[in-house]
Every structure is written in C-alpha cells, then in structure tokens.
Image (spheres, rainbow, N blue to C red):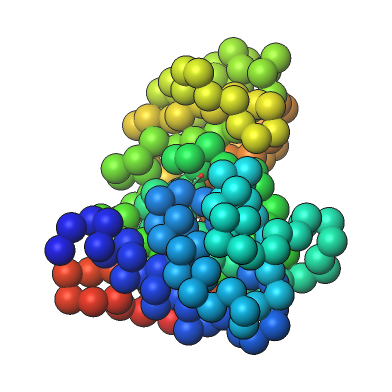
Amino acid sequence: MNQLEMKKQAAQAALQYVKFDTIVGVGSGSTVNCFIEALGTIKDKIKGAVAASKASEELLKQQGIEVFNANEVSSLDIYVDGADEINPQKMMIKGGGAALTREKIVAALAKKFICIVDESKQVAVLGSTFALPVEVIPMARSQVARKLVSLGGSPEYRENVITDNGNVILDVYNFKIMNPVEMEKELNNVAGVVTNGIFALRGADIVIVGTANGAKIID
Ligand code: 5RP
C-alpha cells in the first residue's frame, strides 16, 4: 500500500466522528484533501465546515459543502487535520503547507482534534524528521532567525511562500524538541513570531494512522 492509500484510509475512518447537523473544522494538506473528498459523500448530513486555509475552503466548496467564517461559530464539535510529525503524546509539528496559524485558530475552536496521518508521520521526538515551520511578520524575519539560531536551530527562509495571512515562513532544521510545551511557549514569546508549528499546548485528542494493515485509532 502506498502513502496516498494510507492517507485515504485515515481520512475515511475520520468520518465516523462527524456528528449529524454539525459544522466540521477542516485543516489543510494532502491528507485533509482526502478527508474533504470523503466528507463530500456525507455532505447532506452536516451543516457545513470552517476551513483552515483558502485551498481547503475552495475544495470544500467544490464538494458542495457550505463554508463558514471562524467568526461565525462559537465552537466546533471536531477539527480534522493532518500533521508533519506526531509523537506518542499526540503532540505535533504542523505547517508543512504554511497554514499553521489558521490551523491553530480553528483547532482552538474545537472540542476534539482528530489527527489523520499515514504511518510515516509517527516519531518518538518532534523535530526528528521534519523542520519546524515558524510563521513570521516579514519585517522581523532576520531578527527572529538570529533568535532561532541562539536557541540551537538552523532556520531557512522558505522562498516564494507568503502565507494566507501575508507573512513568511522560516523552517528550523536541527531542532530536537525534547520539551514541546515549553518550546512552543518560548517561541510564542519571540517578537515577530505569529505562530510556531509545535502543536503541544493543544495537541490531538484522537489520532488515526493509516497503515499497511488498515486504519489504526489511538484514542
Ligand atoms: C499544513 C499542515 C498539514 O497538515 C501537514 O503539512 C501535513 O500535510 P500532508 O497531509 O500533506 O502530509 O500542517 O500546514
């Protein structure tokens, strides 16, 4: 089974958590694209969705699903999103698709965060395989990069990428994140950082892993 098939399995299995007549929080990325396609098959069962990126918003509309603005809802029953890495404590690195800020905002609205991944995303320590994305106000790019170096990382400017919020991304290599909660807080406090890609303060509640032997649910 290839990676895409594993992503599809995880996405399909997430449908069981979608409740009747609710608004579903939807993240972004290729695994979420599979989820949006699956959600289209039960679109009459739901009220609509809140999207974490313009790309997801577009795909949801193509499926005939009504998209609500995050300001229009006070809470969501579930938020479904992928991850670049996930550890056994259900903490994640996200932002490979540069949508981390809106993902954190929509995730914060939800009672349950359901993370859908293929098995390649599971790691013991965050930062082992994937650089940590950090969304930065453009005028603060160099000073934030210097701060990240002082913390032991090797930041690289993601060329030709502007986020949905008009900011830039620094990808931080060589960061082994031993204490994700503390690191997330520390990076949040750096002037010029909009959002960092550690999702530990609010991690996932349920993880669905697409594997060669089917979808595995970690509750
Ligand atoms: C986008 C994200 C995605 O959830 C993450 O990059 C995983 O993407 P994919 O499902 O394509 O592997 O955080 O900002």
Q: Quadrant of residue 166?
A: top right
- Please tell me which residue is depicted at 46% across the width and 58% down the height of the picture: 32
Q: Tell me: 155 left or right of 66.
A: left
Q: Does the image show residue 104?
A: no
**As drawn, 82 above or below 17:** above
- Please tell me which residue is depicted at 77% across the width and 70% down the height of the picture: 75
Q: Tell me: 218 left or right of 24.
A: left
The quadrant of the image that shows the C terminus is bottom left
**As drawn, 135 above or below 103:** above
Q: What percent of the width, then of the height, locates residue 66?
A: 70, 63
Q: Quadrant of residue 156?
A: top left
- Please tell me which residue is depicted at 46% across the width and 49% down the height of the picture: 29
- Please tell me which residue is depicted at 65% across the width and 26% down the height of the picture: 167
Total tally of numbered discs in the picture: 0
Q: What percent of the width, then of the height, locates residue 70?
A: 77, 57
- Between 211 and 218, the one lying in front of the other is 211
**As drawn, 52 above or below 76:** above
Q: Quadrant of residue 82?
A: bottom left
The quadrant of the image that shows the N terminus is bottom left
Q: What percent of the width, then of the height, locates residue 101?
A: 64, 43
Q: What percent of the width, then of the height, locates residue 143?
A: 62, 15
Q: Does the image show residue 79?
A: yes
Q: Tell me: 100 left or right of 82.
A: right
